[in-house]
């Protein structure tokens, strides 16, 4: 977060009449109090989830969907980060710098606690001390720290647009800087960095653009990678991050403007998400807010995904290509089969109407109906309208959804035997579903009342859906949503 850059951008906007037009409407991602700036990586402690922001404030949640103003960490300052190593939660934060009061002199400090819950007997912060500083003259501003713990070693990146992004090594046992360790320059033209490791690559993510100007902020998250944690980091076009490169990961969309401060959330099973803040939520007075979004991987690069948009879809199994349908008698579209290949070439060509709900619904049985998988015929019993369930909550950036045969009240539901059926819509948890985008872009469908275990909607063979433990090594639990 560099306030001097924000001020320069505001002056430029006033002098040039700059305007930013944003179209589209995005449904709210999270509920409750989500106001925060520069959020830390989200971490779990004593059954709750925490993130901390600039000026000492924080947020807490039990489900990653509904957030509340949380415990205030000591120290104040800006842009903290949090990581758990062993039985300690280390917190890094910066005091000074960022162009505030016109200066770039700053200290990055470390403290730790064994719990983030102030009601826990393990709660209590212990300050380690300053691990890195900038003097306001050198080509660096020591703020925006971020941790990476990999292979037993602890690293801390820091810095802003004022000079370079730097990397130092800390002792994971104490949080102190490793004796004799010197900072290494790894990037320029970014701030609010984060580091992660995947498949032998180290990824450096940073925020480009301008902050702190609400709906006129241009923040966006970009990335480079290296086989060595010390770099050099290159983007997808081979441009070094030390020369200003960076592949886009996340940017403004809908009514959310200014994406910054990436934080990885890895739930395992090919389900990853990331936290961030948007400089301006246009539906919340242009305030800076927390957001959580799916993380995808394409050709070895991270890219922001998306929650499923409300609409009507066919739900296609990645395993077989068959689609989910309510099991009812097949009704033919009136048609002389010979016409498709024996009609004279000069016979009139006319559209044939799609089969409609009115053509078939009267023959459907009352009460609960089995659900199965079948070849995609674009029929009414294969079309599902999916909408967020109002006031039903959600989980880590995704609302709970209702999945209903289009135009009816027949909702996809779990059964006591662990199967699925279509039954009359009711205000029941067994008709609520999580739909989470996986790292390959497909989706996992999980019942809210799935009970113990990581249950999900799974395809058994080519025709049978059931609830079973999700297996990331198989396509059986991966689904695509196709607009008919």
Image (cartoon, helix red, strand yellow):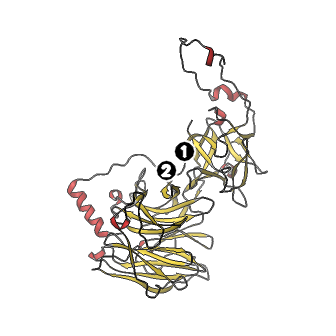
Which residue: 75% across, 38% down? Answer: 367
Which numbered marker is on residue 27? 2
Image quarter (top left, top right, bottom left or bottom right) of the N terminus: bottom left
Image quarter (top left, top right, bottom left or bottom right) of the C terminus: top right
Q: Is residue 328 visible?
A: yes
Residue ranking furthest to the left: 15
Residue 41, percent from left and from top: 50, 69
Cα distance in 3D space between marks 1 and 2 = 9 Å
Which numbered marker is on residue 143? none
**Mark 1 or mark 2, which has the lower sequence index?**
2
Give the crowd class for mark 1: few <14, some 14-19, many >=20 residues within 10 Å.
Answer: some
Does 218 appear above or below 458?
below
Identify the element where label 2 is drawn: loop
Residue closest to the eye, 407 or 217: 217
On the rendered structure, is 397 left or right of 379? left
Residue closest to the eye, 314 or 232: 232
Residue 79, percent from left and from top: 42, 72
Residue 462, percent from left and from top: 72, 42
Q: Quadrant of residue 426?
A: top right
Q: Quadrant of residue 278?
A: bottom left
Residue 14, percent from left and from top: 23, 58
Identify the element where label 1 is drawn: loop
On the rendered structure, is 210 left or right of 284? left
Residue corresponding to mark 1: 310
Q: Are marks 1 and 2 in contact (CB under 8 Å)?
A: yes
Residue ranking furthest to the bottom: 179
């Amino acid at each position: 977060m560099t306030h001097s850059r924000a001020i320069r951008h505001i002056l430029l906007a006033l002098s040039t009449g700059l305007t930013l037009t944003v179209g589209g409407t995005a449904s709210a991602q999270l509920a409750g109090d989500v106001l925060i700036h520069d959020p830390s990586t989200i971490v779990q402690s004593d059954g709750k989830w925490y993130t901390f922001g600039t000026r000492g404030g924080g947020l807490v949640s039990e489900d990653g969907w509904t957030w509340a103003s949380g415990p205030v960490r000591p120290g104040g300052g800006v842009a903290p980060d949090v990581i758990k190593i062993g039985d300690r939660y280390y917190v890094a934060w910066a005091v000074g710098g960022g162009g505030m009061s016109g200066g770039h002199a700053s200290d990055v400090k470390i403290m730790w606690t064994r719990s983030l819950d102030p009601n826990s007997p393990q709660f209590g912060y212990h300050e380690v001390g300053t691990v890195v500083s900038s003097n306001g003259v050198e080509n660096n501003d020591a703020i925006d720290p971020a941790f990476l713990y990999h292979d037993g070693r602890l690293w801390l990146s820091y810095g802003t647009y004022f000079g370079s992004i730097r990397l130092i090594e800390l002792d994971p046992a104490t949080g102190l800087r490793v004796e004799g360790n010197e900072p290494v320059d790894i990037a320029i033209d970014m701030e609010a960095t984060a580091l992660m490791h995947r498949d032998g690559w180290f990824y450096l993510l940073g925020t480009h653009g301008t902050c702190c100007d609400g709906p006129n902020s241009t923040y966006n998250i970009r990335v480079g990678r290296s086989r060595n944690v010390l770099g050099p980091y290159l983007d997808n076009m081979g441009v070094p991050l030390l020369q200003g490169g960076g592949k886009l990961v996340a940017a403004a969309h809908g009514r959310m403007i200014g994406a910054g401060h990436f934080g990885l959330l890895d739930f395992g099973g090919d389900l990853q998400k990331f936290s961030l803040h948007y400089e301006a939520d246009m539906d919340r007075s242009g305030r800076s807010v927390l957001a959580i979004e799916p993380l995808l991987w394409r050709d070895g690069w991270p890219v922001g995904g998306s929650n499923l948009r409300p609409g009507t879809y066919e739900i296609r199994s990645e395993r077989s290509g068959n689609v989910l349908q309510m099991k009812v008698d097949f009704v033919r579209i009136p048609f002389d089969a010979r016409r498709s290949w024996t009609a004279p070439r000069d016979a009139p060509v006319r559209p044939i109407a799609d089969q409609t709900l009115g053509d078939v619904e009267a023959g459907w049985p009352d009460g609960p109906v089995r659900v199965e998988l079948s070849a995609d015929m674009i029929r009414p019993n294969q079309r599902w309208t999916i909408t967020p369930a109002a006031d039903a909550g959600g989980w880590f950036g995704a609302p709970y959804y209702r999945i209903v045969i289009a135009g009816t009240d027949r909702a996809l539901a779990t059964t006591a035997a662990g199967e699925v059926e279509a039954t009359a819509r009711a205000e029941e948890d067994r008709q609520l579903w999580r739909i989470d985008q996986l790292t390959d872009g497909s989706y996992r469908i999980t019942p809210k009342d799935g009970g113990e275990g990581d249950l999900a909607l799974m395809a058994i063979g080519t025709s049978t859906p059931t609830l079973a433990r999700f297996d990331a090594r198989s396509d059986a639990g991966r689904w695509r949503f196709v607009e008919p």
